[in-house]
Image: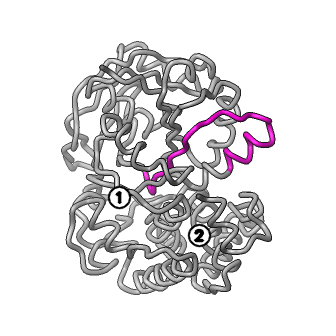
Amino acid sequence: MAKKVTVLGAGNAGHAAAFEISLNGQEVMLFEHPNFAKSLDGIRQKGGIEAVKELTTEGKIVPAMMSGFAKITGLTTDPKEAMDFADIVVMLVPQFAQETIFKLMMPYLRDGQIFVVLPGNFGSMIFRKLMKEGGINKKVTFVETTSIPYAVRVIAPGTIYIEGKKSAFSAASLPASEINNVIEALKDVLFLKIIPLKNVLEVWLSNPNMIMHVATATLGMGPMESRQGKIQFYAEGCSPSVAKVLEKEDEERLAVGKAYGLDLMSFVDVVNNFYELNMKSIRDFAEHTPIHNRMPNDSPKSPKERYISEDCPCGLVPVYDFGKAAGVACPTMEAIIRIDNIYNDADYFKSGITLQKLGLSGMSKEQILDVLK
């Protein structure tokens, strides 16, 4: 029997998820915020989503990993219709929009629903806090993943190019004890291997984007900004010297995990698992990744783009804050955050995802771990 899945967000990743879930025989309702309803027009006109076989960019033909056409069961900007449709809800929106979208959905939550946040970015804790403040006591299982499965872009209304897809990623549930039930429920929805983690904190500390994206973009922003992104982000941006900084950041991340009793995988082990690779170091991955180096020029054009504006406050800042609470110093991460504050006229130490925002301020390590169970 086909499962009914609501996909929240009709951006790049939302298009890809709706396409693949529908292509594999499930019923999909695709929701978009009313302010961005035009994102649905192309799909409505086509009657579904088309994934092209290849993309020509700067004279180079790049084959797609996945292609075809998938009909979409329903399109809506109505939160009630979106939530009433499905037992499984998959949220694929930028982190800055997650709280806004959840507030729209929150009145229509139902007991027994599975609510998946890709990537997690502490969504489960923030959403639970919002539910408590709103007096909503529905028994919802939240699932957080370490990343989004797809490298994808919308190239025309209702049309996408899927450059690549992970073969596996990690996830955890809140409550933590539900993870095995969740994996069984999602096997016909996400179509990749799900590696179960101990709790959502392990998910938050395992997101590889915070290591690869932020420092690479920060330290290479001069030429990236000057050339308007016409640099190959991984192979050129993550040079041998920059990779040394990333290695230090990764050491700090592993130390924070250890302080909370978590045996985290290194960045290299994570990407080897996700993409079935055999890389030996961060620089080896950056120089030779077959997926991320397919496009000739793919760097951010300014520090306002998500590699810094999202992955710094939502990735580095919480790791730094959890480390500070556990007495683990993260000087390399702190240095990058401070530079990014200057770049974007921000104070990510306050506006980012902090323990205070998660409702964990003042708690001991043991108390934090109890909450996450």
| Element type at mark 2 | helix
Identify the residue shown where x is 33% and y is 74%: 268
In the image, 265 versus 282, the foreground residue is 265
Query: Disc 2 marks which residue?
Result: 316
Q: In the rendered image of this protein, does residue 176 appear above or below residue 85?
A: below
Q: Position of residue 335 (x, y in %)?
A: 63, 82
Specify whether residue 38 is painted magenta: no
Image mark for residue 204: none
| Element type at mark 1 | loop
Q: Which stretch appears magenta?
A: 126-147
Identify the residue shown where x is 46% and y is 66%: 206
What is the quadrant of the N terminus in the image?
A: top left
Image mark for residue 297: 1
Side of 56 relative to 334 (left or right): left
Circles 2 and 1: CB atoms closer than 8 Å: no
Side of 166 relative to 330 (left or right): left
The amino acid beneath tag 2 is: Leu
Side of 163 relative to 245 (left or right): left
The amino acid beneath tag 1 is: Asn
Side of 314 relative to 295 (left or right): right
Specify whether residue 135 is painted magenta: yes
Mark 1 Cα-neighbour bin, 10 Å: few <14, some 14–19, many ≥20:
some
How many marks the image carries: the answer is: 2
Q: In the rendered image of this protein, does residue 152 appear above or below residue 366?
A: above
Identify the residue shown where x is 51% and y is 26%: 39
Q: Position of residue 75 (x, y in %)?
A: 48, 17
Identify the residue shown where x is 49% and y is 74%: 262
- Inter-mark Cα distance, 2 to 1: 25 Å
